[in-house]
Image (spheres, rainbow, N blue to C red):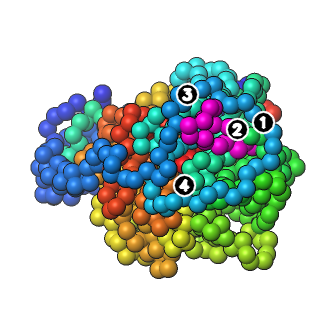
């Protein structure tokens, strides 16, 4: 029986256990008829009256190529190719530091249309899930979207992760086999690692080199991040115990590998009896790149961790290890540098982070946020909670406008709202940090929202630079440059 | 639908909402019980949803969308009820017997195989659980599920796929074909 049929059978059997239900109890009509219940319906103009100016104030404009200096502007004119031949060798030595650390990276590497499984059977029809199509990787120019190369994965496999160094020329990819017997990409498949180099003006414009990194073969890889100098790869993973089902009970490991030597440089391991997770729960591929972050000097490595050991059971912690310090315990030898508290009993909404990472200077955390209409700069994060669900225009809440926020690590307070999208009518919104300069003054983020009630989805890549927010206006930027699977 | 537009007097609102309750509460309680595992809690969530509908009846732009509003409210209520115990439940799932998550009475009624599926389903993150239940219990289309969840169709698609994959893992990958 397929998993879908098992779900149908189990839910139908459970529904059949529902017995008689109690009658509806409504308040008396007098309380219903109080004047405020019957205040005039807000017209569309009323709604616009308080939302449109705010939205207009933040309306993003098409980015001008001259607005932002592009570091190492790509010189390549090479068009998409079938991708380079894969060679086997050791990785690189340290990459060159960027000339202007505030400049937007010239190139992106994005997994195109990442899919965990094939198409679902039509509603109401049973059937098995088919395997996903292998995902290619697109290499392109950040500000124009010009595609320099499309790299197809080796036969029988698909790319599931990408992360970049600070030179926007050096990237690391990983792939897993696509098994025809199962419709899903397995989280614990052996990863194959590749070094991708962009060579502007050369032919081919990219090279792909297979690496040998001793990530355990049965590891459920949750997050990856290449160090700014490109010499070290951080991998956060969990090892299932024998006979384990998901969520696994095995220990979590944060390991740092030497890319050129293919050896383990450092590792921290810890067991969480409450089944915490990297981020909000990494249920299989892709191998996200937005949950681990490095300082520019490569000495501090931060990871998002969510645990149930705290009374705020869904709190998110930004924890940091110092590579210079001794110790191998993931929790005892890492420090909490920021806390996004979980829901409180009153569920008062302030701000929530869909993704969280430190800036290169180690002073700030950047948050792909859901925020209220007027976020309180200076608010302590202990007071913030996950937004309640936005229920559309029929009953809007003031809690879920997507945007980008900065959190001071010295005070653990909301330091700055870099961007916030406040449409007049919205279904839901999310935001992810794609890239930031070491200071956090130049940031790329993916901000998505849906219309209400049409549920049409909009995704934009927002560039915050020189105190202004603009968007990348090339077609499909918001879709291709999605969070988790795009690197710069 | 069941509630055509009309005068918005308290008595008519009471009448219409009560009629909606009689028609749809059983189905919504079933949905909530699938989400939560407890009928009493499911009834509370559904009662709250209807109370909310009654209170906002005069402001409801399109009363034809009342069922959609109710379904969304029930999902929100289940999400709120589920918060805080989700991670705990996931921990319990593998440290305690499934009987601790699925009641003994339900275990007897639905059988061991279904009990395991329900225990795994309730251990999913809220959005994945909602997407899977709406798609495979209510047989909603992606668009309908998106409206109920107040998310985009793409989100339903990804949440469903992640939810199914996680369920497959929880129920052992080798069994999924």
Subunit ID for the residue under disc 1: A
Mark 3 packing: few (<14 Cα in 10 Å), some, or many (20+)? Answer: some
Which of the labelled discs sits on residue B82, or is there none?
4
Tell me, yes or no, whether the highlighted magenta stretch contains residue A381: no
Say which element carries label 2: strand
User: Which residue has dot 2 on it?
Assistant: A208
Q: Position of residue A411 (x, y in %)?
A: 47, 80
Q: Is residue B168 above or below residue A82?
A: below
| A411 left or right of B176 in image | left
Q: Name the residue located 67 percent from the left edge and 42 percent from the top edge.
A: A196
Q: Position of residue A238 (x, y in %)?
A: 76, 54
Earlier residue among tags 2 and 1: 1
Earlier residue among tags 1 and 3: 3
Visible in this render: residue A114?
Answer: no
Mark 1 packing: few (<14 Cα in 10 Å), some, or many (20+)? Answer: few
The verdict on a common chain for dots 1 and 3 is: yes
Earlier residue among tags 2 and 3: 3
Q: Position of residue B4 (x, y in %)?
A: 23, 30
User: Which residue has dot 1 on it?
Assistant: A87
Say which element carries label 3: loop
Please identify, in this view, whether the residue under mark 4 or under mark 2 is nearer the observer: 2
| B9 left or right of A433 in image | left
| A89 left or right of A367 in image | right
Say which element carries label 4: helix
């Amino acid at each position: 029986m397929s998993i879908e049929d098992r779900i149908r059978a189990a839910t139908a059997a459970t529904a059949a256990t529902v017995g008689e239900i109690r009658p509806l109890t409504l308040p008396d009509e007098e309380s219903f008829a109080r004047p405020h219940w019957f205040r005039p319906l807000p017209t569309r103009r009323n709604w616009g009256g308080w939302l449109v100016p705010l939205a207009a104030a933040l309306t993003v404009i098409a980015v001008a190529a001259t607005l932002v200096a592009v570091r190492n502007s790509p010189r390549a004119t090479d068009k998409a190719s079938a991708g380079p031949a894969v060679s086997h060798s050791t990785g690189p030595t340290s990459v060159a530091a960027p000339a202007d650390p505030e400049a937007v990276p010239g190139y992106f590497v994005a997994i195109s249309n990442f899919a965990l499984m094939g198409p679902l059977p039509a509603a109401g029809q049973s059937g098995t899930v088919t395997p996903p199509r292998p995902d290619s990787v697109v290499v392109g120019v950040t500000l124009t979207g010009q595609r320099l190369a499309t790299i197809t994965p080796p036969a029988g496999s698909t790319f599931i992760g990408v992360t970049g160094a600070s030179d926007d020329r050096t990237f690391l990819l990983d792939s897993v086999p696509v098994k025809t017997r199962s419709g899903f990409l397995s989280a614990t498949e052996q990863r194959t690692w590749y070094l991708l180099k962009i060579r502007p003006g050369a032919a081919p414009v990219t090279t792909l080199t297979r690496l040998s990194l001793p990530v355990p073969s049965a590891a459920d890889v949750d997050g990856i991040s290449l160090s700014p100098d490109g010499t070290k790869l951080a991998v956060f993973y969990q090892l299932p115990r024998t006979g384990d089902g998901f969520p696994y009970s095995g220990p979590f490991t944060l390991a740092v590998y030497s890319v050129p030597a293919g050896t383990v440089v450092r590792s921290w391991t810890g067991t969480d009896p409450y089944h915490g997770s990297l981020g909000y729960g990494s249920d299989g591929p892709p191998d996200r790149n937005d949950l681990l972050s490095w300082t520019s000097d490569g000495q501090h490595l931060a990871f998002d961790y969510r645990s149930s050991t705290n009374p705020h059971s869904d709190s998110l912690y930004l924890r940091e290890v110092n590579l210079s310090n001794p110790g191998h315990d993931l929790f005892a030898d890492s420090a909490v540098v920021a806390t996004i508290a979980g829901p409180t009993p009153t569920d008062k909404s302030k701000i929530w982070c869909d993704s969280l990472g430190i800036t290169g200077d180690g002073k700030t955390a950047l948050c792909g946020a859901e925020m209220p209409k007027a976020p309180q700069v200076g608010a302590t994060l202990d007071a913030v909670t996950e937004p309640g669900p936005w229920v559309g225009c029929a009953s809007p809440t003031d809690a879920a406008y997507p945007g980008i926020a900065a959190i001071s690590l010295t005070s653990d307070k909301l330091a700055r709202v870099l961007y916030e999208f406040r449409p007049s009518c919205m279904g839901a919104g999310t935001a992810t940090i794609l890239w930031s300069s070491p200071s956090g003054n130049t940031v790329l983020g993916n901000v998505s929202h849906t219309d209400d009630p049409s549920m049409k989805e909009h995704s934009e890549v927002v560039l915050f630079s020189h105190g202004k927010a603009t968007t990348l206006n090339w077609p499909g930027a918001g879709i291709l440059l999605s969070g988790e699977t795009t690197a710069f | 639908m069941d509630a055509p537009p009309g005068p918005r007097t308290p008595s008519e609102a009471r009448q219409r909402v009560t009629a909606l309750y009689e028609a749809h509460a059983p189905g919504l309680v079933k949905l909530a019980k699938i989400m939560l595992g407890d009928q009493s809690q499911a009834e509370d969530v559904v009662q709250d949803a209807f109370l909310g509908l009654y209170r906002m009846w005069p402001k409801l732009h399109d009363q034809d969308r009342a069922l959609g509003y109710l379904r969304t409210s029930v999902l929100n209520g289940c999400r709120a009820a589920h918060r805080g115990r989700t991670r705990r439940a996931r921990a319990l799932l593998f440290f305690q017997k499934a009987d601790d998550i699925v009641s003994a009475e339900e275990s007897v009624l639905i059988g061991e195989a279904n009990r395991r599926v329900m225990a795994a389903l309730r251990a999913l993150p809220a959005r994945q659980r909602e997407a899977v239940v709406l798609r495979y219990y209510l047989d909603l289309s992606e668009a309908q599920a998106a409206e109920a969840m107040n998310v985009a169709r793409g989100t339903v698609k990804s949440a469903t796929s992640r939810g199914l994959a996680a369920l497959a893992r929880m129920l052992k990958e080798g069994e999924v074909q």
